[in-house]
Amino acid sequence: MTIIGTSPVTIVFSCIFHLCLLITPIFLLAHNILIEDAVGFSLFSFSERFTDRLTFIFLICAAYFLIRRVFLPRLRAISSVYDYVILVVTTAPFLTGYLVYYQVFDYKIMIILHMLTGELMLIAIPFTKIYHMVFFFIGRFVLIHQHTLGKGSRTW
Amino acid sequence: MIEEQTAAVDIKFIRDMLDKNKGKMKLSLSVCAHCSLCAESCFLFNAYNKDPKYMPSYKFIHSIGILYKKKGKVDRSMLEEISINIWKRCVLCTRCYCPFGIDIPSMIALARSICRSQGVFPRYD
């Protein structure tokens, strides 16, 4: 049985989580306006309403992962503080961005927090588990398993 | 045999073995996202009422993971504890599946080699 068969809910949440994580910041109107101002050109943007919903879905998925980690015995057995920190680092830019969009709390402080947490996440990529962002694709070609692309060259 | 069981652990030897395999093992340990998706691929996990202690990730985190964390500075009782995870809870059938492709059997095998080198292994006599 595949992992989609054994843990379908987690796989669906995980796919949506990662898609939203990648798509939302790249095609966000406000980000693209800033990029346009800085470099003179930018990618197309989704409507604000759509990215707003994507952010909300992302936050729900993040909450699912948190609840799963806190309550499932199998995850509690292997979880460390580091796992929670990574989840917070990934979710913080989206949470602050959401609050900024709705101008909850002080706008200036929230937008600065949004930028800082965003930078923190980008800086964290090469130094933490988040580098699976890169190794995910390499692994698909190098390892032999159910999702392999290409032939794979796993020797063990 | 009694002499072997009470002898002090050769920390330098363990550390050499750990250093020799550092690249792959450290990478595997840090890549593990602690997602628990490997759980169901272990038949022992399914057979023991889904006890988290039989999860492949639990087994390598609490064996080779501990050895790297302590940098080889372990005592005999710690090795005995580790040996439960890598012998009693794992038969090295190599069927465990990791979505990231972590080579779990090789990690368990290294932990076994280290324990065996210090005279810690299951005895059936």
Image (cartoon, coloured by chain):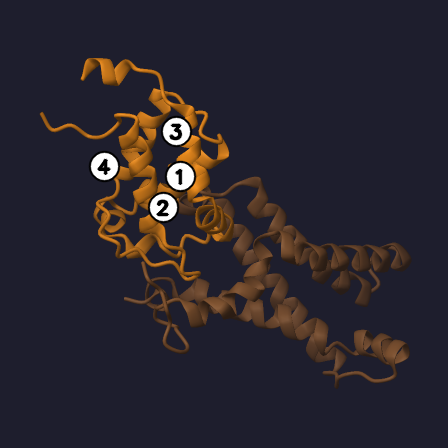
As displayed, is residue B11 above or below residue A137? Answer: above
Image colour assigned to chain B: orange
Chain of the residue displaying label 1: B
Q: Earlier in the sequence, mark 1 or mark 2?
A: 1
Q: Is residue B122 left or right of residue A63?
A: left
Query: Are the numbered discs 1 and 2 placed on the same chain, yes or no?
Result: yes
**Mark 3 lies on residue:** B13
Chain of the residue displaying label 3: B
Q: Earlier in the sequence, mark 4 or mark 2?
A: 4
Residue occupying the point 53% across, 41% down = A80
Q: Residues within 10 Å of mark 2 (few under 14, many from 20)?
A: many
Tell us which disc is closer to us: 2 or 3.
Answer: 3
Q: Earlier in the sequence, mark 1 or mark 4?
A: 1
**Mark 1 lies on residue:** B64
Nearest the viewer among B120 and A119 is B120
**Mark 4 lies on residue:** B88
Q: Is residue B102 left or right of residue A106?
A: left
Q: Amino acid at mark 1?
A: Ile
